Amino acid sequence: MSRGITEEAARTAILRYSTTPPDKSQLEKITEILRRRFDDDSINIELTNDPSLSGGFVIKYKNFEYDWSDSGRADQLEQGLIISHDSFLRPHNKEENIISILKGRIEEFELLAEAKEIGTVIDIGDGIATIRDVGDVYYGEIVIFEDGTRGMVLDIQEKSVGVILFGDQRGIRAGSHVVRMNREAGISVGEDYLGRVVDVLGAPLDGGANIRPVDYYPIEQPAPGIAERQSVCEPMETGILSIDTMFPIGRGQRELIIGDRQTGKTSIALDTIINQHDTGVVCIYVAIGQKASTVAQLVNTLKSHDAMRYTTVIAAMASDPASLQYIAPYAGTAMAEYYMHRGQHALIIYDDLSKHAVAYRSLSLLLGRPPGREAYPGDIFYLHSRLLERSAKLSDELGGGSITALPIVETQAGDVSAYIPTNVISITDGQIFLESDLFFEGMRPAVNVGLSVSRVGSKAQAEAIRKSSGSIRIDLAQYREMAVFTQFSSDLDESTKHQLAHGQVLMGLLKQRLGRPMPMADQAITLIVANAGLLDETDKDEIKLIQRRMLNWFHHRQEKICLELRQEKYLPDRLRAEIIEAAKEYLASPDAADEKLDKMPY
Ligand code: ATP
Ligand code: MG
């Protein structure tokens, strides 16, 4: 640090003053404080006049600076006042600080002698600053540049430190000062964030009122250990028939939603949020690198279903710096952890991790790290695994809270063997694979039954659904295969014809419109009726209509059955028989039964 400077000069502190220099006794006192602070009796003070200061004085010793000028004190006072609204700066003793600043006497100097450690920018560009002499900063620490821009330390070299900037870099030049904050990056949390759209630092983007946080969570936290967890045991119902029956998700699970662009990935996540309206699950939607208009549309959809009430949207848009996109999922997880630690259940959606990986890749390349496969840095796997490991179901002793994660990954032309998709597939507890061919065939949601899987959720699946879903997955897989083989043949035997008809009915039933989550009881009735083969004779274009009418009829005419399913979530054989009997009764004369019903709400 003091290369090229003589020993003595290295031990001299420079005191700059504007008009009146400190008198002899003040100078002695300051020297005394400095000597004590740095445990070095040979420190001397050299005075220089600096008319640019606005009264008071500034002392610089090595890379420490004590700003006791009028403007410096005013800044500190301002910081002290606004500090509580600041997600990065949490005051330890705000009132005391302000009082001592106000008194502003030399004697108080020591109280405030929380010297700022000052570094110098040696290189700036592309949202990355390289700084020098900033003391022993640690990885993930926040630093503030002299124009107020914040940054986070992401790269520590022997002689310099790489910092990613969270704001505009135009006010920063080579030679600018940087102050280390001794604080790791974090986000304020609290219930006030529900219903809001915020940026990754927790500042509102929706033009609403100020948010009153109750706590501050670092964005990087170790994942809960083995002893702190329990296995997944409660369902996280998506309300989407094809997912809840075949690939059930449990609270605390991580289920990947993967597919090409425009295959309905976001829609699945949104429907899942909408379905949480009466479950008490808090939802956090993290938008990474998306267009602002897409996010605005999504917020509107959530609002129109009254789902913003229990949802926070954290957005790092496509136009935001890569640094903000990089920390977005961590900030979202920190917010979800707040609820999990309080014993609540949170659902977090990362939309999407492909863009997150791209943001991290550009940061890494700019930081000069070597590119690996597909030019991603070597730690990209660790980056996502340490993020997703933070989703957990906590043990009962720790309150039993949970974070369920639905990361989204975009594939190119259905290629799941690309780097990021394989990584995230191996980290998560299963994936829902959406296929564009199915999507364009009109099979929406376009869930590919063969390639999707859920590894832990079936333990948490409602008994009624597990019992009623039967062999639906196998039936569908066989149907898909058979449909390809029999495409061009006209002479089919009876059992093949029957299998095809049954498969078509199932495919029809699994189609679902947007924003119409299906309650568990309706799912169970649909499955039981379909698996009993009662719908196999139906015209496949009419199947959706018949399903809706029948469920509506059940709601109005078979309230007892619906109530029992809803309350017990259990399916004794007696109930199954009752449902089949009732369905037969309805299907015998569907139109007659319909006449008496009100317009379908469902
Ligand atoms: P992107 O790759 O752009 O993020 P995505 O995979 O997230 O796209 P969505 O935005 O969810 O896809 O959906 C794409 C389009 O498909 C939307 O216009 C949406 O309305 C429509 N869509 C999705 N699911 C369904 C569905 N079940 N029924 C009808 N339309 C649907
Ligand atoms: Mg999307």
Image (tube, grey):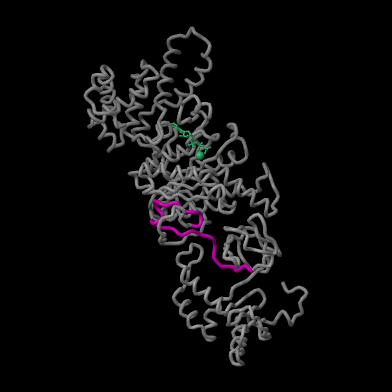
Residue with the most extreme bottom position: 24
Q: Quadrant of the N terminus?
A: bottom right
Q: Is residue 581 visible?
A: yes
372 versus 116 height, above or below: above
The x, y position of residue 224, in whole percent, is 48, 53
Is 188 magenta? The answer is: yes
Relative horizontal placement of residue 465, taking residue 288 as reference (left or right) = left
- Span highlighted in magenta in the image: 177-201
Q: Nearer the viewer, residue 300 or 420?
A: 300
Q: Nearer the viewer, residue 389 or 584?
A: 584
Relative horizontal placement of residue 133, taking residue 79 as reference (left or right) = right
Q: Residue at x 48, y 7 (%)?
A: 491
Displayed quadrant of residue 72: bottom right
Q: Residue at x 64, y 52 (%)?
A: 363
580 versus 457 height, above or below: above
Is 128 magenta? The answer is: no
The x, y position of residue 4, in whole percent, is 78, 74
